[in-house]
Image: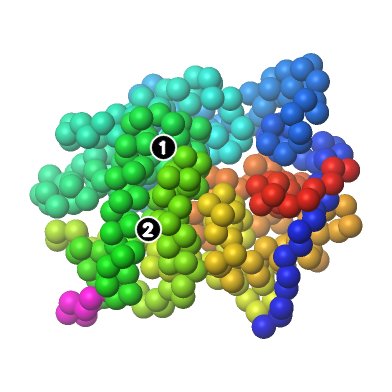
């Protein structure tokens, strides 16, 4: 296995990004990477106007219903006839707008926050089961499970959008963290899978972390401070080798294939550190960095070192033979990547990763040089 070391200094190619990247990347570079005051008010206003007209923004907001919902569902990653889902769901679409840098006062975000906050309220309205409503009519256990999981997705979306100090978000987040903490302290954290017939099933009392739960914690600085011990245990859990056995979550009579739940490290990479799913890997690594647990994951460090090694002297990601924008095979990273519309030019194909690596370096507290 190729040994790669992480840098502690990174050059951020601000000039290159401003010349070649799409407006969401330029907007976020100004707001999240550059020191405060680096751009003039006039430049910021111009960028905001360009952002609101950006095609990915208008395409996404146009699909939103007046109820604030997308695709008549909450957690869908793609259209699915089996699940009666006709489009990507509300959580992913809402988070996509957040990743695009849409201002928090934008109407589309405000509209979506109504049903998302309602999911946190423990309202028993059957309509709030959304894509699970039909199945829950004959499977009460599915209804109970779905309400908790939908609440988890909504909490992650709202925390990601900057509502981490809202009492409703904090309350939901701490309940989720408490359940996971109990799991990590139990024997089930080591043996969460049981065999029943021909199937491997998650133990009914097991509560492993989901991608949503990890995102909730990563986007809540106050929780990182208040539950430091739990965050450390979670980081080590997420670094352990995950089972290779296929397993399901049995909910009443329904067996659910886990999409968001992890029993260890979800990252996969080859011996050279190249990730199998680059968009998801970048999102996951950003979450680990935000939680301060990057050092616990050997796979994440190996992938990140490979990506930085593929950057040129100015910090521009420049791998060999890049013919298209990388796509997420799992679709778990689709909401965040790519922000570029297309990969018609070499610069566009490299811009998303170049920006993500700059952001990760800034979040990690490395020494940065703006060029």
Q: Which residue is mark 2?
A: 209
Q: How is the image coloured?
A: rainbow
x and y percent of residue 87 in the render?
Answer: 42, 42
Q: Residue at x 58, y 38 (%)?
A: 99
Looking at the rendered structure, the secondary structure element under dot 1 is helix
**Residue at 43% over, 67% down:** 237
Residue at left offset 61%, top offset 48%: 337
Q: What is the magenta segment's predominant secondary structure?
A: strand
Numbered badge on residue 65: none
316 horizontally vs 57: left or right: right
Identify the image quadrant of residue 111: top left
In the rendering, which numbered label is found on residue 90?
Answer: 1
User: Which quarter shows the C terminus?
Assistant: top right
The picture places residue 131, in percent across and down from the top left corner, at 28, 43
SS type, badge 2:
loop
Q: In the image, which residues are magenta?
A: 193-199
Which is more toward the observer, 227 or 265?
227
Earlier residue among tags 1 and 2? 1
Query: Residue 147's image quarter?
Result: top left
């Amino acid at each position: 296995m190729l040994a790669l070391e992480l840098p502690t200094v990174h050059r951020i190619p601000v000039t290159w990004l401003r010349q070649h990247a799409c407006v969401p990347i330029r907007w976020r570079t100004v707001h999240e990477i550059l020191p405060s005051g680096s751009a003039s008010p006039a430049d910021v206003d111009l960028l905001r106007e360009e952002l609101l007209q950006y095609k990915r923004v208008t395409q996404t907001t146009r699909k939103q219903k007046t109820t604030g919902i997308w695709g008549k569902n909450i957690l869908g990653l793609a259209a699915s006839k089996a699940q009666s889902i006709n489009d990507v769901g509300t959580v992913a679409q809402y988070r996509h707008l957040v990743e695009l840098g849409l201002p928090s006062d934008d109407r589309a975000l405000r509209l979506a926050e109504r049903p998302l906050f309602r999911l946190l309220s423990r309202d028993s309205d059957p309509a709030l089961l959304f894509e699970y409503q039909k199945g829950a009519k004959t499977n009460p256990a599915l209804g109970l499970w779905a309400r908790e999981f939908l609440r988890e997705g909504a909490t992650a979306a709202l925390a990601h959008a900057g509502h981490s100090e809202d009492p409703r978000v904090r309350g939901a987040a701490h309940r989720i963290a408490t359940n996971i903490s109990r799991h990590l302290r139990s024997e089930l954290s080591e043996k969460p899978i049981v065999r029943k017939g021909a199937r491997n099933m998650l133990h009914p009392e097991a509560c492993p972390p989901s991608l949503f739960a990890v995102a909730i914690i990563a986007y809540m600085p106050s929780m990182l401070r208040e539950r430091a011990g739990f965050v450390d245990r979670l980081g080590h859990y997420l670094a352990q080798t995950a089972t290779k056995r296929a397993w399901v979550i049995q909910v009443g009579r329904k067996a659910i294939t886990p999409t968001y739940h992890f029993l260890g490290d979800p990252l996969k990479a080859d011996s050279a550190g190249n990730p199998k799913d680059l968009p998801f890997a970048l999102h996951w690594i950003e979450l680990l960095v935000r939680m301060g647990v990057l050092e616990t994951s050997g796979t994440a460090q190996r992938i990140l070192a490979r990506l930085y090694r593929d950057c040129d002297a100015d910090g521009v990601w420049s791998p060999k033979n890049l013919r298209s924008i990388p796509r997420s095979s799992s679709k778990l990273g689709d909401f965040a990547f790519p922000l570029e519309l297309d990969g018609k030019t070499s610069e566009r194909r490299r811009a998303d990763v170049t920006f993500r690596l700059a952001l990760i370096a800034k979040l990690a507290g490395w020494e940065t040089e703006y060029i």
